[in-house]
Amino acid sequence: MIKAILVFNNHGKPRLTKFYQYFNEEMQQQIIKETFQLVSKRDDNVCNFLEGGSLIGGADYKLIYRHYATLYFVFCVDSSESELGILDLIQVFVETLDKCFENVCELDLIFHVDKVHYILNELVMGGMVLETNMTEIITRIEDQNKLEKQEGPYNSASTSSLKAGLAAAPARAVSAVKNMNLPQQIKDIKLPDLPAAIKDLKF
């Protein structure tokens, strides 16, 4: 099982963090710091996995990583996972990001964090590997992109109905008060005018 997926740059700044076990914010920061210290000290010519840090499982867990340009991709896994299998999974993840962002870079992970998490969720969910076929993953992402384009943030029908609803709200409120079984002096109370900012609201 995968316990955590961490992506940080050469200076240890986290660019993507996904924990599949609960750790509070302070502990997460400590894990990221410790993981960076363990991974960044290693030479490029040594193997890409090592024993997990003291904060995230110790000898029962392994850190499996790949270093691409300015970014480290680190998967913390238990003994049930294959080291080579996870190395391949990291490669699939990076190649998928590269296809989706056309030459992915560190800034893409910063400015498109939602899309990066969506891509990751296609590969791994709840610490379990879901899909390793990059073609399948990209097909699902493209389908999702098509749906988002069709729906759009607000279509014209929903905008006009929202506008009509807001415009009619004060009148409906006054009518509701008048129709209630209330003493005449309460019914005759004048409601204050809406602030100009609300009256001038445009969509």
Image (tube, helix red, strand yellow):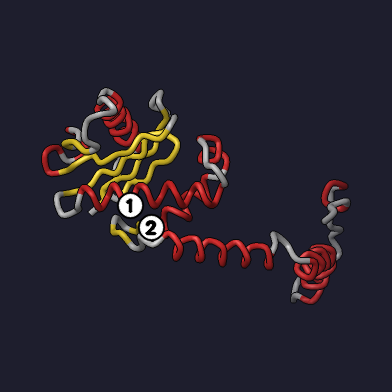
Give the image location of residue 156, x and y in percent.
80, 66
Quadrant assignment, res 180 = bottom right
Quadrant assignment, res 68 = top left
Describe residue 141's horizontal placement relative to residue 131 as left or right: right
Q: Name the secondary structure under disc 1.
A: helix
Q: Nearer the viewer, residue 82 or 120?
A: 82
Which residue occupies the extreme left position in the image?
59
Q: Amino acid at mark 2?
A: Leu
Identity of the residue drawn at 38% across and 57% down: 123
Give the image location of residue 153, x and y in percent.
69, 59
Image quadrant where one finds the C terminus: bottom right
Q: Does any portion of residue 183 appear in the rendered image?
A: no
Measured Cα–Cα span from mark 2 to mark 1 = 8 Å
Q: Is residue 170 above or below residue 10?
A: below
Give the image location of residue 165, x and y in percent.
79, 67
Image quadrant where one finds the N terminus: bottom left
Sequence-first disc among 2 and 1: 1
Describe residue 3's horizontal placement relative to residue 54 as left or right: right
Identify the residue under disc 1: 89
Label placed on residue 123: 2
Q: Name the secondary structure under disc 2.
A: helix
Q: Is residue 197 above or below residue 151?
A: above
Describe residue 158's horizontal placement relative to residue 83 as left or right: right
Q: Nearer the viewer, residue 115 or 10?
A: 10
Q: Residues within 10 Å of mark 2 (few under 14, many from 20)?
A: many
Q: Are marks 2 and 1 in contact (CB under 8 Å)?
A: yes
